[in-house]
Amino acid sequence: MTHIARLLSRHSADLTWQRAFYEDLHEHPELSGHEHETAEKIARKLADFDCEVIPGIGGYGIVAVFRNGDGPAALFRADFDALPVREETGVPFASPTGVMHACGHDMHTTALLGACALLDAHRDAWSGTFLALFQPAEETGAGAGAMVADGLVARVPRPDVCLGQHVMPGRAGEVQTMPGPQFAACDSIRITIPGRSAHGSMPHKAIDPTYAAAMVVVRLQGIVGREVNPDDFAVVSVGTLRSGSTNNIIPGSAELVLNCRFYDADVQRRVYAAIRRVVEAECAASGILEPPTFEFFGRGELIDNDPGVFRAVRPVFDSVFGGASVDAARTTVSEDFATIPRAFGVPYLYWVVGCTPRELWDRAVAENRVDEDVPVNHMGTFLPEYGPTVDAATRAAAASVLTYLHR
């Protein structure tokens, strides 16, 4: 552990390129499934290292394989897609379009490439196989699954462990780890409620799906409040309600899109059964004859960190980061990272790196105004404090891999 800390404190690898690379990615973001130029930039940078580059997995996914003799294999994953968010940071390298790296994936990619540079420069310090996986389309929840479906498991060496990280609000440079559930499981559900259209002046000739949908929205709020144990966790949010297109026609159908999150599979099953029961009952109460339909999409698997991997990596982080290696708290956001280690059937650890400007974070904590003053992921004002964040994320990626591969 001390050896890894000394190795990573020297910064003997050239990382001066990271800032320009990060700002270029940030200024030129690409939406999920359209990351052509971003993938090309990653591949060009990987050409600087002694590795085998396997592009085009599940669309624009890339795996770089660093082979260095006999030993175990460790995989580290970073995502690189952006969001349909208009940037409001005001920095010189802000995105000029309505697309933005509002979730820090540009930082994830920059950090993993930095870890590639460190491990490539210090091959005398490790042996085995290092896999750097760059994943597209995380924001849609499709990217990891697409890479797996495109033969990821057969196309790259099998890792013994998978690792990953995410920048989130917190004191910039803090590395936050924990065993067990870290990010919630999630699904989106599209519910279509059929009805019968009629002129707005003749509601008695219609079966009004808007009214039924409104009643469903009200009843859904009671599921978590009245059917879930207060010791458990569940979220059922109505993201959209679409019904009708003009003022004087009762529409023929209505659509609800829900977002649901859980830490426990049994709670998830019971809540989904309750959602179906509520929707079908409200449709029956409104005299709707056709059954409603349910479409599940945007799935994010529960990220449930392996205790053994945590016990191996955490002491290394403590050695490398000192007081900036801290305990994490569970978060209700979701990620598709766990799809990859589950496909390989190997344990994993996924952690959080704080990225809020330190002065802002310390002041917000002191004044108890974190919720009001600190920008969060997916906001147009979200921007990591570059220096401490890229340093911590780069060294955390390298340190976690070296935990398993160091000589």
Image (tube, rainbow, N blue to C red):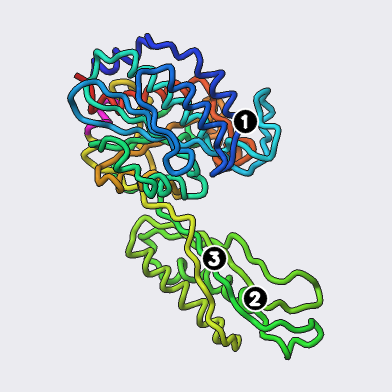
Residue highlighted by disc 2: 253
In the rendered view, tell whether residue 281 sits above or below residue 156: below
Amino acid type at mark 1: His
Kind of element beneath mark 3: strand
Does the stretch in magenta take in 316? Answer: yes
Query: Which residue occupies 51% across, 46% down?
Result: 139
Kind of element beneath mark 2: strand
Residue at mark 3 to residue at mark 2: CA–CA distance: 13 Å
- Name the side, left or right, on which 365 lies relative to 234: right
Residue at mark 2 to residue at mark 1: CA–CA distance: 40 Å
Residue 11 percent across, percent down from the top left: 38, 11
State the predominant SS element of the stretch in magenta: helix
**Considering the image in quadrants, where does the C terminus appear?**
top left
Kind of element beneath mark 1: loop
Amino acid type at mark 3: Arg
Residue 378 percent across, percent down from the top left: 57, 42
Dot 2, crowdedness within 10 Å: few (<14), some or many (≥20)?
A: many
Query: Which residue occupies 43% across, 48% down?
Result: 146
**Is residue 176 something that shows in the picture?**
no
Give the residues drawn in magenta, as a range: 312-317
In the rendered view, tell whether residue 204 sits above or below residue 100: below
**Considering the image in quadrants, where does the N terminus appear?**
top left
- Name the side, left or right, on which 368 lies relative to 381: left
Mark 3 or mark 1: which is in front? 1
Q: Which mark is residue 190?
A: 3
Residue 69 percent across, percent down from the top left: 20, 21
Residue highlighted by disc 1: 28
